[in-house]
Image (spheres, rainbow, N blue to C red):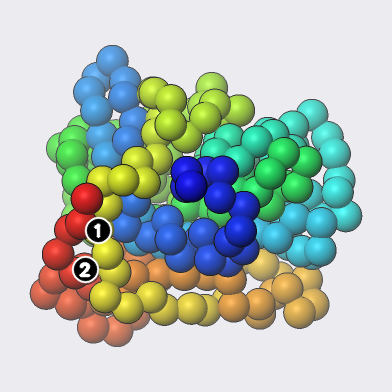
Amino acid sequence: MDFWTDHTKTTEEIAQDLLGCLVIKETDEGVTSGWIVETEAYLGEIDGAAHSYGLKKTPRLASMYKESGTIYIYSMHTHLMLNVVVQEEGKPEAILIRAIEPYTGMDLMAERRGKAGFVVTDGPGKLTKAMNITKLDDGTLAWDPPLRIDVDTRKSPKKIEVSPRIGIPNKGKWTDAPLRYTVAGNPYVSRKKGKIEADFGWDEPTN
């Protein structure tokens, strides 16, 4: 079954499956891409930290209610956040892509960020700026250019670490819910602590 139409998996499971998938953004300046190393699951109607909690509907949230694979872009503190809807139409559950490990277009990403090294894409607002992801990408589909998530060309994490989401204050049990997933040992994970693995936490790539 296709990755985006297989609704037998939970949003938490899909958030882990997305680790190692390749985000690609095509622009006039060039193509940038990176392996997903950090995700957060948002569980829609029941999730006190989700924009769609209680099935809230506003024009800004329109993409959340569309088909699986729909890109949802929103702004937070002037930064844009890249999300993808992962359940069937009308079930507004999505995954936030929090960090990527650059693959192609590293120089272009560094130029856009005005920085080099791990800090170029080790956070959700950083990666969208580095890849020139904009609000024009909101409502598009994850398999259609210019912004795609390639679920076939991928790397496999050796170990996935699970922890509470970041920046979720005053949401009761949802503040500490273990819904953040990271590639253990990867230096591009936001707020990285601990050892950096020589292989950045990957097994050999699989196609």
The spot of residue 86 in percent (x, y) is 59, 48
Which of 8 and 57 lies nearest the eye of the viewer? 8
Choose top left, top right, bottom left or bottom right for residue 48.
bottom right
Find numbered disc 2 in the image and state the secondary structure of the residue it sits on.
loop
Circle count: 2
The spot of residue 40 in percent (x, y) is 54, 62
Task: Please tell me which residue is depicted at 79% across the width and 29% down the height of the picture.
Answer: 59
> Can you say whether 146 is above or below 88 in the image?
above
Task: Please tell me which residue is depicted at 58% across the width and 35% down the height of the picture.
Answer: 70
Residue 126: tell me if it is visible: yes
Which amino acid is tagged 1?
Lys
Which residue in the protein does label 2 denote?
202
- Contact (CB < 8 A) between labels 1 and 2? yes
- Of all residues shown, which one is farthest toward the top? 28
Mark found first going from the N terminus, 1 or 2? 1
Task: Please tell me which residue is depicted at 26% across the width and 75% down the height of the picture.
Answer: 158
Which amino acid is tagged 2?
Trp
Which residue in the protein does label 1 denote?
155
Mark 1–mark 2 Cα distance, whole angstroms, equals: 7 Å
